[in-house]
């Protein structure tokens, strides 16, 4: 993207530090984790089981031992209800209960009148679900989860409920039809001519989740958007961005001020930003807390240093067996309102059309290349007829000849690494007004928050790999004196993908600024990663957001 300027308004330690999760209320931490890929009668998923294992591993390595994980066939209705009932019985006052589900969701007419504004209730589908009399038993209603959450609360526990699924709605952006098929955690609408499900309820159940007292919710998307399975840098296959973000939060990633206490505000902000980045804006996580909980000050969990914590007894379920670019222009209307590692996995390139004989001879400057069929989960698809390059349903670059593919490949490797860096200590960074595709002449606003007294560096990587410095330039103040910064950009060609990157730190990073300025207007994404490796400070926060433009 070319932009036009308008106006400017490692410390050493003798041994590694071991962190463990602690419950600030003094009770135990207990978890029930569910992940389902192998659906028998509806489209299977690809990353839900890995999500469940990831969260389980994070909790266990952080010292939590009472963790039950149910995957695929283990997660039938009888088993889920039995394990959650057993967990209620083990729960004591001041415990923290973590419930995490990953799999298909759906929406059905509400069974409790007035419980949902739109008259539809959320449903979680189990492996044997089908719209048949017997298959109808294999699902869990949202009201049933509320029933059990109330039982935990009545025992004096707090609950963290993570729903990495979706229940209705459409997509944030249209998917280019030439792209490989995307996987979403939602099934098509269905009807149940005969419903044999007998819900678990009693008279004291809350009418809605707003009637709960000690619970916090994280949902992958709102009720109007689909939740995709995404590619995570450095991880094979597809995953749920929410589950991945929550697992990293448990490992300490959500402790923004490094005080060893993760508040609801820190957890919510961290997870929202990580998911937003990993999904290229396709997901906006929904976060809610019971009215009686303070998002600002309520501490969800603490991170304690020291020896291994005493085990919390609980049953276990065995697992299933540099080239100069044309001058660029910046359109800005500004209103002030730990060390990364390089990825060695190859960039998987597929091609459409007949002019593809020489792709095997491509040599990248910074990343290995693997030529694969279009249906084999490629990172990039090149249409030799239109010369468009497509990635995960979006056109990342237009008019790319075979000789120019190398720069797009190098950019893809660089963005992969930037996402990895930005997941560790994210800087809150958003694109407004929405997550759609922007056309020529539109104004896009880049918004940073929580940057008071922090030094700010902003730059962009276009779809063809061209780097452009955005901030600070000229008389821009490198240290923010307010909590927010807004930068307006006007869409101009070349069109495709834009990756806006924000680096903030407690002190100005002049060497990093100068190094990026030396790369300005150059196709040098690999060199940019080396620059960040060299000059990022230990306290740096990195935000990395992709958005998409078109003629």
Image (tube, rainbow, N blue to C red):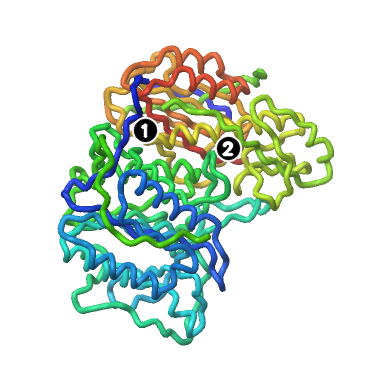
Mark pair 2, 1: CA separation: 20 Å
Q: Which residue shows up at 58% across the image and 27% down it?
A: 2
Q: Is residue 243 left or right of residue 14?
A: right
> Residue 102 at what x, y percent from top left?
44, 59
Query: Where is 418 relative to 153, above or below?
Result: above
Quadrant of residue 427 in the image?
top left
Query: Where is 127 relative to 432, above or below?
Result: below
Residue ID for mark 2: 497
Q: Which residue shows up at 84% across the image and 39% down it?
A: 357
**Callout 1 crowding tier (Cα within 10 Å): few <14, some 14–19, many ≥20:** many
> Residue 83 at what x, y percent from top left?
34, 68
Q: For numbered disc 2, what is the local secondary structure?
A: strand
Residue ID for mark 1: 448
**Callout 2 crowding tier (Cα within 10 Å): few <14, some 14–19, many ≥20:** many
Q: For numbered disc 1, what is the local secondary structure?
A: strand
Query: Where is 96 relative to 433, above or below?
Result: below
Q: Quadrant of the C terminus?
A: top right
Q: Is residue 289 left or right of residue 178?
A: left
Mark yes or no: residue 403 visible: yes
| Sooner in the amino-acid sequence: mark 2 or mark 1 | 1
Asked whether 10 or 20 is in front, the reply is: 20
Q: Which residue shows up at 20% across the image and 79% down it?
A: 203
């Amino acid at each position: 993207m070319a932009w036009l300027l308008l106006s400017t308004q490692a410390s050493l330690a003798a041994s590694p530090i071991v962190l463990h999760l602690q419950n600030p209320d003094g009770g135990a931490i207990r978890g029930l984790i569910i992940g389902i890929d192998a659906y028998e009668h509806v489209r299977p998923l690809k990353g839900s089981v890995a999500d469940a294992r990831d969260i389980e591993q994070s909790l266990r390595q952080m010292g939590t031992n009472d963790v039950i994980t149910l995957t695929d066939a283990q997660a039938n209705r009888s088993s889920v209800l039995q394990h959650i009932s057993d967990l209620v019985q083990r729960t004591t006052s001041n415990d923290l209960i973590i419930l995490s589900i990953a799999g298909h969701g759906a929406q059905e007419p509400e069974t409790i009148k007035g419980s949902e504004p739109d008259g539809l209730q959320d449903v979680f589908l189990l492996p044997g679900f089908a719209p048949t009399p017997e298959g109808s038993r294999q699902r869990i209603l949202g009201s049933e989860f509320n029933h059990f959450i109330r039982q935990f609360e009545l025992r004096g526990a707090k609950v963290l409920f993570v729903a990495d699924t979706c229940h209705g709605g459409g997509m944030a952006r249209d998917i280019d039809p030439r792209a490989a098929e995307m996987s979403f955690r939602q099934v098509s609408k269905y009807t149940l001519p005969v419903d044999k499900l007998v819900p678990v309820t009693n008279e004291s159940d809350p009418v809605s989740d707003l009637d709960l007292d000690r619970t916090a919710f994280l949902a992958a998307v709102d009720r109007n958007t689909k939740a995709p399975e995404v590619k995570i840098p450095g991880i094979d296959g597809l995953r749920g961005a929410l589950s991945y973000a929550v697992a990293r939060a448990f490992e300490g990633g959500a402790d923004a001020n490094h005080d060893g206490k993760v508040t609801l505000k820190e957890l919510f902000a961290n997870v929202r930003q990580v998911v937003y980045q990993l999904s290229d804006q396709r997901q906006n996580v929904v976060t809610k807390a019971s009215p009686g909980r303070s998002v600002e000050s309520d501490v969800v969990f603490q991170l304690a240093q020291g020896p291994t914590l005493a085990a919390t007894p609980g049953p276990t379920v065995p697992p299933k067996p540099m080239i100069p670019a044309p001058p660029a222009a910046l359109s800005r209307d500004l209103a002030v309102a730990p060390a990364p590692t390089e990825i060695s996995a190859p960039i998987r390139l597929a091609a459409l059309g007949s002019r593809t004989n020489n792709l095997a001879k491509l040599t990248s400057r910074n990343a290995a290349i693997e030529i694969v069929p279009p249906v084999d989960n490629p990172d990039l698809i090149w249409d030799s007829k239109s010369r468009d390059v497509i990635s995960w349903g979006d056109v990342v670059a237009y008019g790319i000849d075979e000789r120019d593919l190398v720069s797009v490949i190098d950019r893809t490797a660089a963005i992969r690494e930037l996402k990895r860096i930005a997941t560790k200590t994210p800087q809150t960074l958003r694109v407004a007004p929405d997550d759609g595709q922007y056309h020529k002449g539109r104004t896009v606003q880049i918004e940073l928050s929580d940057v008071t007294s922090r030094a700010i560096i902003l730059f962009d990587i276009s779809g063809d790999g061209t780097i452009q410095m955005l901030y600070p330039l000229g008389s821009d103040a490198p240290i923010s004196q307010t909590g927010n910064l807004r930068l307006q950009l006007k869409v101009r060609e070349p069109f495709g993908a834009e990756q806006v990157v924000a680096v903030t730190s407690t002190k100005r990073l002049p060497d990093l600024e100068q190094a990026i300025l030396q790369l300005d207007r150059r196709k040098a994404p690999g060199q940019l990663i080396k620059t960040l490796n060299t000059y990022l400070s230990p306290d740096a926060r990195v935000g990395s957001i992709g958005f998409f433009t078109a003629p």
